[in-house]
Amino acid sequence: SVMKCLLLVLALMVPQMVMARVGETLEQCVERYGEGKEEKYGISAPVGVKTYSFTKNGLPITVSFWHGKAFEIGYGFYECEQKSTVATFKKLQKANGGEREWGKLWEVGDRKKRASTVDGSMSGHYLLDSDGNLHYVNFSDRAAWSETYKLLKELQAKEEEEKASKATD
């Protein structure tokens, strides 16, 4: 039917519409999606991570930046009326990984699978809804993610030390 054809065309277009790439600048993301909104809630904000929310064709996209480059990108398919499948995840893998080769997907939970690039520089995962459609997709640069996580843990330890020190004063 015409409706099925239209849905198929839209499903194939989603990766082209949401081609944020790990490594892009904020300016490139704004060019791709339009103005974003800086989020203040990000857990890594205290160590300099900037997180922005964008919406493109009804799809919420969250991008976190470290040293001016996107290191983590999340796609909220749960907000879309159009349903997307694992094929969309694979297209987004290619868009975000560029020429890097991706390893096999492995299951990490109920309806959740993860993959890493063969060189270990990137990871990606998806979560399916109860109907088997994409619910959420995420890609990240592993080195930047590890660095920001380490800095956050160091900051939290320092804050705990300061609290303990004040408690004994």
Image: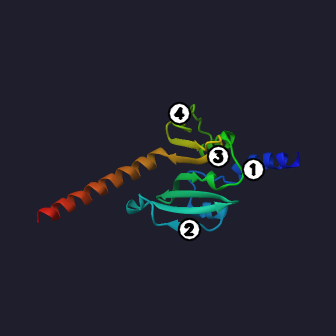
Give residue 107's mark. 4
Amino acid found under the numbered disc labelled 2: Lys
Residue at the (21%, 62%) spot, across then down: 163
> Quick one: quadrant of the N terminus?
top right
Front position among marks 3 and 2: 2
Mark 2 neighbour density, 10 Å: few (under 14) some (14–19) many (20 or more): few
Residue at the (59%, 66%) spot, across then down: 36
Given the current orientation, which residue lies at the most extreme right position?
A: 1
Seen in the image, is 162 located left or right of residue 156? left
What whole-number distance in Å separates the C-alpha atoms at marks 4 and 2? 33 Å
Q: Which residue is mark 2?
A: 37
Q: Which residue is mark 1?
A: 13
| Residue 112 percent coordinates (x, y) | 54, 39
**Lower position in the chain sequence, tag 3 or tag 4:** 3
Q: Nearer the viewer, residue 27 or 107?
A: 107
Q: Nearer the viewer, residue 79 or 169?
A: 79
What whole-number distance in Å separates the C-alpha atoms at marks 3 and 4? 22 Å
**Lower position in the chain sequence, tag 1 or tag 4:** 1
**Lower position in the chain sequence, tag 2 or tag 1:** 1
